[in-house]
Amino acid sequence: MPLRGCLRATLALIFALPLCAQQPAAWTDPSPHRVQFVTVDENVRLEVLDWGGSGRPLVFVPGLGNTAHVFDDFAPKFTARYHVYGVTRRGFGASSAPAAGYGADRLGDDVLAVLEALKLDRPVLAGHSLGGEELSSIGSRHPDRVSGLIYLDAGYSYAFDNGKGMTVEAQQEMAKHPPPSGPSRSAADRATFGAFQAWFLRTMGIAIPEAETREMYRPGDDGGVGFPRSPVHVSPDILAGFKKYTDIPAPVLAIYAVPKAQAPWLKDADPNVRSAYQEFMDKTDALTEKQVKEFENGVPGAKVVRIANANHYVFLSNEADVLREMNAFLATLK
């Protein structure tokens, strides 16, 4: 075959290749943050997200099992008035996962080390769920280092425990009679991180940012959702490292989701399962209300807000309510 004919045949073969042979574009986090790592202890670095903004620093701390990416959609809504950050605690996501160092005050010291490294002057700390532990550790030991504390369904016994509210002992008693198991994740639900995100929304009623699911779980060999990134020892070590805090003098906003909303998956569940789950939730709500009242009485000057029929991820399920309460509180701080 003449050279010109070979060239034509080669080009025809190249352009005849199906488009699916091309490599798909790598997924990128759409949230407008900058990622940096801050050394907080020997051989321990924490991932810190910086959404930018100007004004007083506002630092978000996630709950147990989550990373700072859980705030990817929520945090940018404050950048018009505040410089907004998020800290992923040790043991999770891209932060270091050492063998030790998961006690309450050590985790609080990690956040303090981030504040020092970034030279943040008296920021406001906002913690979700277990993040209330770091807030109370810092607020009770170093109230001069912060301007205010915001508990996002985070003011439970790991954050405030005077022995009268929702104590660890009461929680352990509840654990003896757990609710029925929720819906399991099918292979299709774990096939992609987008499908996994859709499963959260369909069953739990909350839209977890896709970046967060990617930080919580490793990708599987097939590109789907694999095993959790966090080592198995981390969560038990954190639970074993609780400390009782009773003196929280900094200005405080405590938002509670009580009574909590029923998960969407229960609408189609067996009536017996629905009934058993509701019984468990009624007991939990009663304990939560007891904790709320003790927090109100035990933290003088705290503004305590109840949001009814909200999810534990109250900043996702009731974003407008939380934005309103946070902005009103932030505006009062000196």
Image (cartoon, helix red, strand yellow):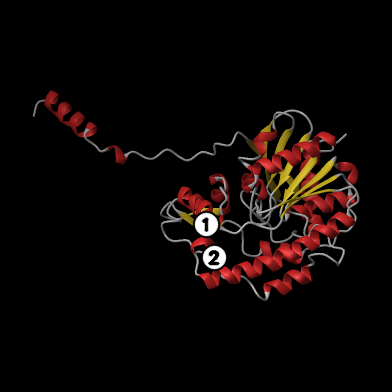
**Residue tagged 1:** 203
Q: Is residue 222 above or below residue 126?
A: below
Q: Position of residue 38 (x, y in %)?
A: 71, 42
Q: Is residue 241 above or below residue 192?
A: below
Whether residue 332 appears in this view of the structure is: yes
Residue sitting farthest toward the left: 1
Alpha-carbon span between mark 2 and mark 1: 9 Å
- In the rendered structure, which amino acid carries the disc numbered 2? Gly
Q: Position of residue 202 (x, y in %)?
A: 50, 53
- Relative to the observer, which residue lies in front, 227 or 291? 291
The reply to whether discs 2 and 1 touch (Cβ–Cβ < 8 Å) is yes
Q: Position of residue 209 (x, y in %)?
A: 56, 45
Residue name at image x 29 percent, y 37 percent: 19
Label 2 CA crowd tier, 10 Å (few <14, some 14–19, many 20+): some
Query: Earlier along the polypeptide chain: callout 2 or callout 1?
Result: 2
Q: Quadrant of the N terminus?
A: top left
Left or right: 82 in relation to 186: right
**Residue tagged 2:** 182
Where is residue 228, by image quadrant? bottom right
- Relative to the observer, which residue lies in front, 271 or 84? 271
